[in-house]
Amino acid sequence: MSDTSRGLPPRPLSPHLSVWRWHITMACSILHRGCLMALYVGALVLVGWTLALASGPDAYATYAGLLTSPLGRLVLFGLTFALFFNLAYSVRQAFWDAGHGFMPKTADMTGAAAIAFAAVATVVVWVIAAFTGAL
């Protein structure tokens, strides 16, 4: 708490989520951080796949079985979303770095577009994978 020696009521030192109105740019920022963490997990999954591939057919079959389990597919689906959202968010950020897109309506629209792109692209990739027999 801040110093209230002059008789002022105690105030928090920083704003809390209950103080701010929830909006799409806040959701995009939080989602971006979560997706970055998911992509780190994805890198570990890729390293595990590479080690299983190098360890021989039995280890690879076991790891492939893990990845094709319902939980493994859910993780891979989430990683696909994280990858596409990070791609869209990075394009949005590049425009911001150039000084464009800071108007509130534009920022909200591009945030919603990044989430929508990630969702649609993820579903399209998984539908194509299902139709081509990759799943």
Image (cartoon, grey):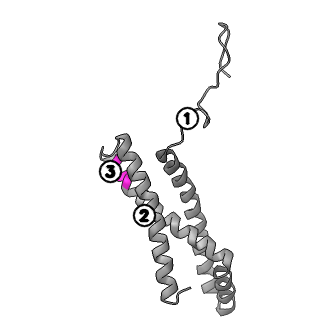
Tell which tag, 3 or 1, sits nearer the viewer.
1
Residue at figure coordinates x 57%, y 74% from the top left: 46
Instruction: Report the Cα–Cα distance between label 1 and label 2.
Output: 27 Å
Q: Which residue is mark 3?
A: 95
Q: Which residue is mark 2?
A: 117
Q: In the figure, 26 relative to 8: above or below?
A: below
Judged from the image, the secondary structure of the residue bearing numbered disc 2 is helix
Tell me what residue is drawn at x 51 percent, y 54 percent: 32
Residue 82 in the image: x percent, y percent?
A: 52, 63
- Three-letter residue code for mark 1: Trp
Quickly name the residue at label 1. 20
**Residue 77 x, y percent position in the rendering:** 57, 72
- Say which label, 3 or 1, has the lower sequence index: 1
In the displayed structure, 13 sits above or below 21; it is above
10 Å neighbourhood of mark 1: few (<14), some, or many (≥20)?
few
Q: CA distance from mark 3 to mark 1?
A: 26 Å
Report the amino acid beneath label 3. Phe
Q: Image point 46% across, 64% down: which residue?
A: 118
> Start and end of the magenta stretch?
92-96
Give SS at disc 1: loop
Find residue 98 and report its horizontal and vertical position in percent.
30, 47
Q: Quadrant of the N terminus?
A: top right
